[in-house]
Each structure stands twice: as C-alpha cells, then as structure tokens.
Image (cartoon, rainbow, N blue to C red):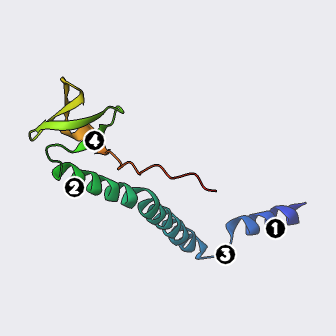
Amino acid sequence: MPAFQVLNAILAQGAPGQGGMDMMSLVLQIGLILLIFYFLLIRPQQKRSREHQQMLNQLKHDDEVVTSGGVYGKITNITDQIVTLEIAPNVRIKVQRAHVAGLKAAESAPKPPQK
C-alpha cells in the first residue's frame, strides 16, 4: 500500500520546471483571445463609427435622411448639434445630429416585367 502512496506523490509533483511553461502558455492563450476580439469586434466597430461620423460631417441642406428611430425626412436646417427634418409638407421635427442613422437610399426605377 505505501508504494501506491509514493507513486501518487511522485506523479502529483510532475516534471520539474513545467510550471513556467504553463504560465507562458496561459499568457499566449489570453493574448490570442484578445487579438481575436480586437480583429472581430473592436476594429470593425471603430470603422463603422468613423464612417458614421464622416457621414454626419457631410450632411447638407436638402439631403434625405433616416433617423435612428426610423423617421424619414429632408433636411431643412442644420446646425452643429441639431438637424431640422421635414417629414411631411409643413411638418418639421428637430433631432440631434448624432441620431441621423444614414442617408436615404436612392430608389431605383421599377424594373419592367421579364418575358
């Protein structure tokens, strides 16, 4: 019976110097996970944010836009922070410039039916 206890004690200790490799492996794994998060999540979000900010800076009078709430309208007045949209004839609303989600997509002409 004591031989099994000695064998278990020897196996539990492991090879000498192996603890440093475990720590290095853990650091590499965490670094790899952070790198994956950067390229899959952080970098694309920064790109979208940069493109949105560029679009906001290029807004001008008579642009047709859509807000983040889904309201479509034409810009009648624009300041640094506020955009006035005409959503129907003689119906105007003011929204924060940051809540303009994008320009209204150009409507394509209806396609003729195929024969």
Tag 1 or tag 4, which sits nearer the N-term? 1
Image-quadrant location for residue 95: top left
SS at circle 1 = helix
According to the picture, the residue beneath numbered tag 2 turns out to be 54
Q: Nearer the viewer, residue 102 or 34?
A: 102
SS at circle 4 = strand
According to the picture, the residue beneath numbered tag 4 turns out to be 65
According to the picture, the residue beneath numbered tag 3 turns out to be 15
Separation of disc 4 and disc 1 at Cα?
Answer: 75 Å
Q: Nearer the viewer, residue 14 or 88?
A: 88
Residue ID at (18%, 38%): 75
Tag 3 or tag 4, which sits nearer the N-term? 3
Separation of disc 4 and disc 2 at Cα?
Answer: 14 Å
Q: Nearer the viewer, mark 4 or mark 2?
A: 4
According to the picture, the residue beneath numbered tag 1 turns out to be 7
Residue lying furthest top: 91
Residue ID at (75%, 64%): 9
Q: Nearer the viewer, mark 3 or mark 1?
A: 3
Q: Tell me the quadrant of the picture where the C terminus can be found.
A: bottom right
Query: Mark 2 belongs to which amino acid?
Result: Gln
SS at circle 2 = helix
Q: Tell me the quadrant of the picture where the N terminus can be found.
A: bottom right
- Left or right placement of residue 115 versus residue 100 in this view: right
Tag 2 or tag 4, which sits nearer the N-term? 2
Dot 2: within a 10 Å radius of its alpha carbon, few (fewer than 14), some, or many (20 or more) residues? few
Dot 4: within a 10 Å radius of its alpha carbon, few (fewer than 14), some, or many (20 or more) residues? many
Q: Is residue 6 above or below residue 55?
A: below
Tag 1 or tag 2, which sits nearer the N-term? 1
Separation of disc 4 and disc 3 at Cα?
Answer: 67 Å
Query: Mark 1 belongs to which amino acid?
Result: Leu
